[in-house]
Amino acid sequence: MSRKITLGFLIFIIFSLTTTFVIAGDGTTTLNAHGPAAISIEVPDSVDFGEIETGENYFNTDKSIRVDINNTGNTDIIVSLDFESGYEGIFENTYVSETKTNPDNDYLYSDFELLIDAPSGGEPGHEWFYIWLDLTNVTEQIGYENQQADLIYTAISA
């Protein structure tokens, strides 16, 4: 008898860990199957600032570039930015803003986070930001060859 109760209890526990039942207000029962969160984003292959000069802030200019990101996973995400490990160079002066015209909402790339909703209605979640260089405090000459760095987009579940 105790084995049947233990087995029944064990089956109940296993069943309750894999599915969740929700009783709706109208008396119907809805089954919500919860699977693992899938995180997937689409980002641009590159961002090209063109020719730049020291001493300039490229906020709200044609060199302030819109970057679009699509959330193609199944959960809300937070996207942050970083450069490849050990990078030191001109792109450490990269700033980010959700608007192109309000300098009060700008962030150094490493302090920026962007919330992107999960896909809805068959369309990916979509957000954008503007990215630019602020070189007003840079005094060394900029060499145009080899001025590139890998920008890393990190997405985590919100």
Image (cartoon, grey):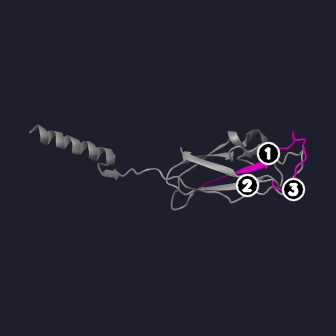
| Label 1: few (<14), some (14–19) or many (≥20) C-alpha neighbours in 10 Å | few
Q: In the rendered image, which residue does mark 3 sit on?
A: 51
- Residue 101 position within the rendered picture, expressed as x and y whole percent measured from the top left: 78, 47
Mark 3 against mark 2, which lies toward the viewer? Answer: 3
Report helix, strand or loop for mark 3.
loop
Q: Which residues are magenta?
A: 125-146
**Distance from Cα at disc 3 to Cα at disc 2:** 17 Å
**How many residues crowd mark 2 within 10 Å: few (<14), some (14–19), many (20+)?**
some
Q: Are marks 2 and 1 in contact (CB under 8 Å)?
A: no
Residue 146 at what x, y percent from top left?
Answer: 81, 55
Residue corresponding to mark 2: 66
Q: Position of residue 33 (x, y in %)?
A: 36, 52
Residue drawn 33% across and 51% down? 30
Label for residue 38?
none
- Secondary structure under tag 1 reads loop
Residue linked to disc 1: 89
